[in-house]
Amino acid sequence: MTELAHHPYLAGAESLVAVLDSMVDLQPAFLPEADQRRALQVMRAVASRALAMEAMLMAAAGGVAEADGHRDVAAWLAHRSHASLAAGRRAQRLGDACDRRWQHLGRVLVTGCVDVDQGHVIVAALDDLAAAATLVDVGAEEWGRVLALAEAHLVEQAAEFGPRELRRLGERILAVVAPELAEQLEEKELEAAERRARRRTSLRIQHLGDGTALIRARVPESVALRLTTSLEAFTNPRRAEGRCGSDGETVPYDRRLGEAFCSLLECLDPARLPLHGGDATTLVITMDLAALVEGLGAATLADGSRITAREARRMACTADLVPAVLGTRSVPLDLGRTARLFSPGQRKALALRDRECRAQGCSIPSTWTEAHHLEPWSRGGRTDLANAVLLCSRHHHLIHDDRYLHDRLPNGDIRFARRR
């Protein structure tokens, strides 16, 4: 009995192996440059067509994996050939997509008109478009026609563009083949994205125990942009003085953003915040009377965190802060006076008078500054214009920093000098 002849598909595959075997000992280094150029193009086309045919074969060979108890053809092939399972799965997805949904793309892949890398991109774009069927008000027949037009257009564009450009074209393919539906789909997709963003919004605060806390937030893009815009109003990267610390060294941008975030919180108007615990949101600080007056020692926040008395005094200049001042027997002496905060009218008057931060050499505009009591409020200083000066956040910190001396110049500016 004569042995049955091989199927033409298998015979052709084995003949390819024979041709490659005949080329093993040939040295491409000896090819003339013109031949090398042509050989590179031919070998790429051959490799791409071989990969496409392998993908189509994998889509049709599910019975092989099932017979040997493997999860899928990619797993079977990886086991037998010791090849990458991830690469095999990727090839199988391409073959399945072309076999079940995008037959036109499958035909041009195996003929070499479209590179296999381009094929992966086109499949991804078409699958995304197909998944959007529930977002548009159109019948199944009409939507099928749209998908066919999209497939034909992307295959046509593959003659001119590589995978990267095709990916961008695929993102906007509906605007090309069905512009009347593109706006409707974009609106639905944006609405869905906004709903997902709201569901995923979160903020976590982790106290690290070293005086700092780590804040992790996930917010909608529009909120992130609004926050970035607000922070950049404080960092003002166009001004060189905002980029340097007190020692003259350049301050990293992420640190400047962090400091701007702190300044932004201090600029919030508590009167416009929701009621919290029966009162407008207010920060309560517990500290000894001596610490408030002398600026030495520590203060305790409502959650038990500790800060320096100097920082508490600085915060009292701008925040709606209630200092629970304790006497020698820890008896509350004073729960604060709202009159210590400068009124909006006083702020406007200070802006007209000072125009910018009054630290010597600083040109931060008045809209980004904080009002500071020249004679501390804790020592009886009055909340009036004669006892006020505008300082930017950086210099407001310095004026409360014991490492720095400061004095007022005849023109009203504040001059700082680091203690030696």
Image (tube, grey):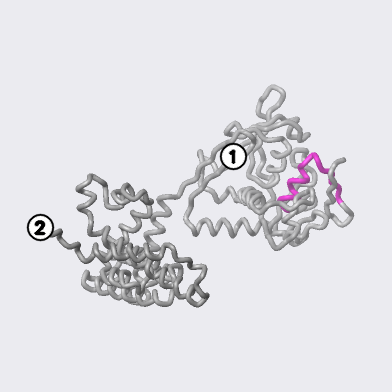
**Residue 387 screen position, x and y as percent:** 79, 49
**Residue drawn at x 57%, y 36% as measured from the top left:** 207
Q: Is residue 140 left or right of residue 214?
A: left
Instruction: Tell me the crowding category of disc 1: few under 14, some 14 to 19, or many 20 or more residues within 10 angstroms, Cα based.
Output: few
Q: Amino acid at mark 1?
A: Ala
Q: Which image quarter is the N terminus in?
A: bottom left
**Residue 362 screen position, x and y as percent:** 78, 57
Which quadrant would residue 355 be assigned to in this image? bottom right
Which quadrant would residue 326 be assigned to in this image? top right
Residue 265 among those drawn in magenta = no
Q: On screen, 85 above or below 9?
A: above
Instruction: Tell me the crowding category of disc 2: few under 14, some 14 to 19, or many 20 or more residues within 10 angstroms, Cα based.
Output: few
Residue closer to the observer: 400 or 171: 171
Q: Which image quarter is the C terminus in?
A: top right
**Residue 352 screen position, x and y as percent:** 74, 62
Q: Is residue 332 left or right of residue 51?
A: right
What are the residue bounds of the magenta stretch? 392-408
* Residue 1: assigned label: 2
Residue closer to the observer: 290 or 221: 221
Which residue position holds label 1? 213
**Residue drawn at x 51%, y 75% as measured from the top left:** 32
Residue 398 among those drawn in magenta = yes
